[in-house]
Amino acid sequence: MIAFFKIKDWFQNVDFDIQIDNVQSKDGAVDTVMTINNETVYAEVKKEVRPRHVAIFEAITEYRRPLLIAADYITPNAKMQLKEKKINYLDSFGNAYLNLQNLKLYIEQGNAKPVISKHSTLFTQSGGQVIFNLLKNPELINATQRFLAHISNVSLGSVSNIIQGLIEEGYVVKWNKEQKYQLVNKEALLEKWVITFNEKILPAHKVGRFSFSKTNKDHWKNQLMHPNVLWSGEPAAALVTDYLNPEKFSMFTHLPKAEIIKDLRLLPDEKGEITIYEPFWLESDTMERLVNYMNHQNAVHPLIIYAELIYNGESRNMETAQLIYNEYIQPNL
């Protein structure tokens, strides 16, 4: 009964007239049975749903159909897989995919975010900067704390607390007798890092907002391919995938404001279309940066591009974010 009332409460966030009633059932295969617009629906209620759970739900649909998956939070990748397999879902934010006989509905507001404990010591600015390097290269979990502090631009003392937090919250385990560590649950860690990156790291490293001068707005790819600039967000996605036409621009650079204005020909503007940040990581090797520049890939790491696109939540960015995730991020998780 609790599961039914939880689902009914979440449907209140869906701005649509839907009739929901409980069905008295002893079906032990699912959490609850209900009717939605007079159609019997079997439902499972979860705290979080991730791609690895989808196969389990697919097996349930062989003998309980239609099935509704309701959860506090469903990752974007899990939503995509559920939709592809025509498995109905609803999250606590009011996002839903319902492919029923009496109701066809698809709502994606881009507002769903995993829950982060207020007491977590991990998802702070410093924690996020260390986690970024671990997600880029999970083998760094066994690097010296001094090295992790150096490449993450955080204090040595904070690294010890961050590693301990990763262990306590189940993201790091010891995996052999040599006391080596292994980064685990990386998909869940990525989801929470996306929030930390956008809400804590970016604001701390914001230089300001700028506008294009009239002469370079339509030629940003060529005129702003500067060796001291790394594109991020939508323009970086356009460079990496050649799939998106950017409308909002962001970049990372160590250039001071005077050189941003002079060399990049950008104008300070509180309502400008370009947001500029100072890099929060140790810069890449010079040769690697040169290769990226020569290949017209003057962009930040795919993790940062993905984090900006997916957090933005705009539908035009979601598909591009998925492309970047599939090609550059998922193989490392």
Image (cartoon, helix red, strand yellow):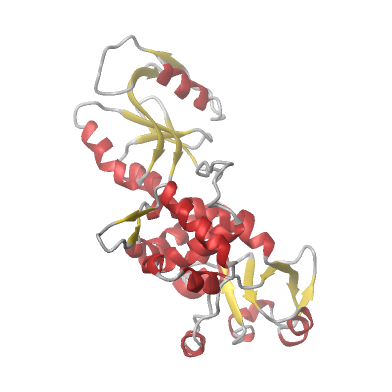
Q: In the rendered image, is residue 314 in sight?
A: no
Can you tell which quarter of the image residue 279 is in? bottom right
Is 329 positioned to the left or the right of 160 in the image?
left
Q: How many marks?
A: 0
Of residue 145 and residue 264, the one placed in the foreground of this image is: 145
Of residue 239 and residue 275, the one placed in the foreground of this image is: 275
Work out whether 123 lies above or below 85.
below
Work out whether 209 lies above or below 298.
above
Residue 246's x, y, as percent?
A: 58, 67
Residue 301's x, y, as percent?
A: 49, 71
Can you tell which quarter of the image residue 66 is in? top left
Quadrant in which the C terminus is drawn? bottom left
Residue 148's x, y, as percent?
A: 49, 70
Work out whether 18 lies above or below 235.
above
Q: Point out the residue furthest to the top here.
A: 24
Residue drawn at (62%, 65%), measured in percent from left and top? 247
Residue 98's x, y, as percent?
A: 40, 33
Residue drawn at (55%, 80%), measured in percent from left and top? 283
Of residue 104 and residue 211, the one placed in the foreground of this image is: 211
Can you tell which quarter of the image residue 258 is in? bottom right
Quadrant in which the N terminus is drawn? top left
Residue drawn at (52%, 41%), measured in percent from left and top? 115
